Amino acid sequence: MKKWSFLLVLMLSFGLILAACGGGENEGDAGENSGDDGGEEAADAMTELQLGTGSTGGTYYPLGQEIANVLNDNVDIEGFDVSSVSSDASIDNIAQIGRGEMQLGMSVHLSALEALEGAGDFDGETIDNFGFMGHIYPEVMQVVTTEDTGITSIADLEGKRVNLGPAGSASNSAGKLILEAHGLEEGDYKVYEEGFGDAAGRLQDGKLEANFGLLGLPAGNVTELATQREVVILPIEDEAMEYIEENSEYGPLEIEADIYDFMDEPVTTITAYAVLIGSLDQVDEDTGYEITKQLYENADSISHEQGEFMTMENIMNGSEGMPLHPGSERYFEEEGLLDGEASDTEGEEESDSEDEDEEG
């Protein structure tokens, strides 16, 4: 009897072990599936980030390096690191974020709006996996030539050698629009597509007649060129300005005569906003929150002259029409900046437009 009892207990125990093993296998399968889903989500969220800037001779690149330094010094997230990398600027940065090759990028806000619609240089390809994270500075188109070229208007650039900026930049597309507004189509001038700094050297050496750049005011490369040559900034004519406003979202801006020592009178040009955007796939909400909070609360440590525009008063400029990054949106809400409208910044923009050179 004891023998049979022992065998019965043994059989029951063996059955329980099999059931437990079977249950473990099922749980393991479920856990593996959950792990796959969660793993994909975790793999997409990154803490080692790349910040796309622009060409080394422009405004984006040195300012982007300082932005990366501020973030690395202040964001307290394990494994967090931002590398500032050169690129072909706005359009290129957006495209690389779209492909998952970059996580953060500097961009003209109009290029970002075009990406959302698949318009302009995006040619029907919609990119919408990014969100607005904050205003950086007003970008101002500067069409630079030298006095010895004899060129006094943009229309005079017919048949001339013209640098429009890298192919993946807002400077390039805006430059083409400006030339078109003055009656010059592609083929009416010889195109160079280099960074503004590299092309400034060509202009200085007499190998170019004009250099287009969406830059901050004042632009260091323009100031430096003026130490070597008699510099002229070409104005956008009245009718051409009307054409640009009808065919784009760029707005007019007057470069005051005291911005550069070589200027004797104001010059009319166009302007837009430089903004910071972040991937919605690879920058999670908590990381996005810390990026926005630490960048704008420590922006006073940025020495670059365009860093002065990275203030709480300007932070929402350029957000209209753009999705907000969830982390940035949380910070904006905490600071009372949304007022129930995620992208309604009209009041802030009107206020800033009264300040010299801040509308951009």
Image (cartoon, helix red, strand yellow):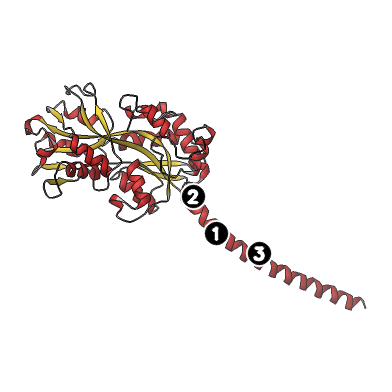
**Residue marked by disc 2:** 45
Q: Nearer the viewer, residue 1 or 83?
A: 83
Q: Which residue appears at 48% of the width and 53% of the height?
A: 44
Say above or below: 162 vs 227.
below
Amino acid identity at mark 3:
Glu
Q: Disc 2 to disc 1, how far (Cα)?
A: 13 Å
Provide the secondary structure element on which disc 3 rests: helix
Chain-order first, disc 3 or disc 1: 3
Q: Which residue appears at 14% of the width and 45% of the height?
A: 184
Instruction: Give the numbered dot on residue 37.
Output: 1
Q: Is residue 203 left or right of residue 333?
A: left
Provide the secondary structure element on which disc 1 rests: helix
Number of residues whose C-alpha sits closer than 10 Å to that of mark 3, classed few (under 14), some (14–19) or many (20 or more): few
Query: Of the residues tagged 3 and 1, which is closer to the observer?
Result: 1
Q: Nearer the viewer, residue 43 or 336?
A: 336
**x, y percent for residue 148:** 7, 31
Instruction: Give the numbered dot on residue 114.
Output: none
Which quadrant holds the N terminus?
A: bottom right
Q: Is residue 74 visible?
A: no
Q: Is residue 266 visible?
A: yes
Amino acid identity at mark 2:
Ala
Q: Is residue 354 left or right of residue 254?
A: right
Q: Is residue 249 left or right of residue 150?
A: right
**Residue marked by disc 3:** 27
